Image (cartoon, helix red, strand yellow):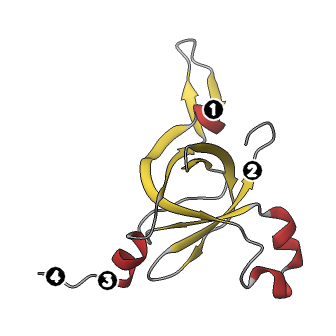
Amino acid sequence: ETAMTEADILASTYTDACTVYRPQKVEQPSGESVFKKGLEGQVVYKGIPCALSSPSGGKLNQSQTTARVDTDFLLFVRPEVDIQPGDTVKVVRLGKEFICGAGLAERHPSHNNVPLKLQKGTA
């Protein structure tokens, strides 16, 4: 029996799921390339466990007042999940869908913490 790592223990508390879309250049049959972003981007992760939380609690509001304005949610995922700035993340939480843009992840040995900005016209 292998011991659970801190990442495993944290991941066992993730009750939400997310799909991550990365902007990509697609070459058309005509030869011109089109930039596809948002939900038209390339799916890099599908239905992975995560935890969506509000940034109002915790250390964001001490010094980084600007970060708080730009962030609607914090997304917690396993450390090997590489969500990059500019990715679009669709999170399903308690049956509701949230479509967000990802900021720069804060990486920890046990998890990554990704700031998300809710995109207009969703929620």
Mark 3 and mark 1: Cα distance apart in space: 37 Å
At horizontal 44% and vertical 80% (from top left) the residue drawn is: 110
At label 1, the amino acid type is: Lys
Residue on which disc 3 sits: 5
Res 22 visible = no
Q: Is 115 on the left or on the right of 83, as rendered?
A: right
**Residue lying at 52% horizontally and 13% vertically, measured from the top left:** 29
- Image quadrant where one finds the C terminus: top right
Looking at the image, is 95 positioned above or below residue 60? Answer: above
The reply to whether residue 69 is in sight is: yes
Please name the residue that numbered disc 4 is placed on.
Answer: 2
Amino acid type at image mark 2:
Leu
Q: Compared to 13, does 96 lie above or below?
A: above
Q: Earlier in the sequence, mark 3 or mark 1?
A: 3
Q: Is residue 41 left or right of residue 47?
A: right
Question: Is disc 2 in contact with disc 1, using a CB cutoff of under 8 Å?
Answer: no
In the picture of the structure, the residue carrying the numbered disc 2 is 118
Q: Mark 3 and 2 residues: CB-CB less than 8 Å, in contact?
A: no
Mark closer to the observer (3, 1) = 3
Camera-side residue of 32 and 59 = 59
Q: How crowded is the residue under tag 3: few (<14 C-alpha within 10 Å), some, or many (20+)?
A: few
Label 2 Cα neighbours within 10 Å, binned few <14 / some 14-19 / many ≥20: many
Q: Point out the tag, 1 or 4, that comes first from the N-terminus.
A: 4
- Element type at mark 4: loop
* Residue found at the very far left of the displayed protein: 1
Which residue carries the number 1 mark? 36
Which element carries disc 1, helix, strand or loop? strand
Q: In this view, does 122 lie above or below 26?
A: below
